[in-house]
Image (cartoon, helix red, strand yellow):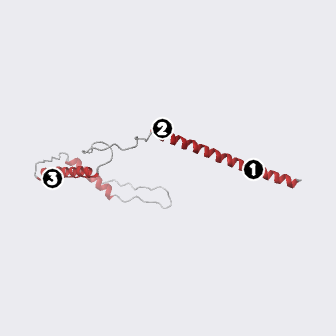
Amino acid sequence: MAHSTRSNVRSLRFRSAAIRSRQFLNGILTVNAVLLAALVWTNVSDGPSTAHAAPSFTQDDQTMGVPNAGAQRERLIAEVRSLRDDIRALDGTLNGGKVKVNVGNLAELKKIMDDAAAKASAPAPRVDPTAAAVTPVTATPPKP
């Protein structure tokens, strides 16, 4: 009798798992069918949607829509030529002697340059291989 009870329990567990699996599958299929019906309904009821369609473009390519690669390249080439002309004009101005530069704070600039040179020539920080942090070495620049 004990043997039949065990087989009945196993049989009930198997049936229970099969029923839950079937219920889950039926639920997923139902959700899938509802979503498919909603998709079909939106496509059929409103007709073809033009919300995602690109508007047509004009000859001068000023409206949004399908890009005209040839017109884009022509505009890009025109801009590059314009930049080249601007650079030539700037170069002519600088090389022609029309620009005068007057530096009035030479002492301050010399001090800044000396400080930067002192920092660049300072020794590299020492690294202790047993420590996790880097210990910088502080150097005091010579005073002029």
- Say what amino acid the circle numbered 3 marks: Arg
Q: Residue at x 74, y 48 (%)?
A: 16
Judged by depth in the image, the label closer to the viewer, 2 or 3, is 2
How many labels sit on residues? 3
Query: Which residue corresponds to mark 1?
Result: 15
Can see residue 29?
Answer: yes
Which of the numbered marks, if any, corresponds to residue 88?
A: 3
Residue 48 in the image: above or below residue 7? above
Left or right: 12 as drawn, with respect to 84: right
Marks 2 and 3 in Cβ contact (< 8 Å): no
- Check disc 3 and report its element: helix, strand or loop: helix
Counting residues from the start of the chain, the first of labels 1 and 2 encountered is 1
- Check disc 2 and report its element: helix, strand or loop: helix
Query: Which residue corresponds to mark 2?
Result: 45
Crowd class of label 1 (few under 14; some 14 to 19; many from 20; radius 10 Å): few
- Check disc 1 and report its element: helix, strand or loop: helix
- Say what amino acid the circle numbered 1 marks: Arg
Crowd class of label 3 (few under 14; some 14 to 19; many from 20; radius 10 Å): few
x then y, percent, for residue 75? 23, 49
Counting residues from the start of the chain, the first of labels 2 and 3 encountered is 2
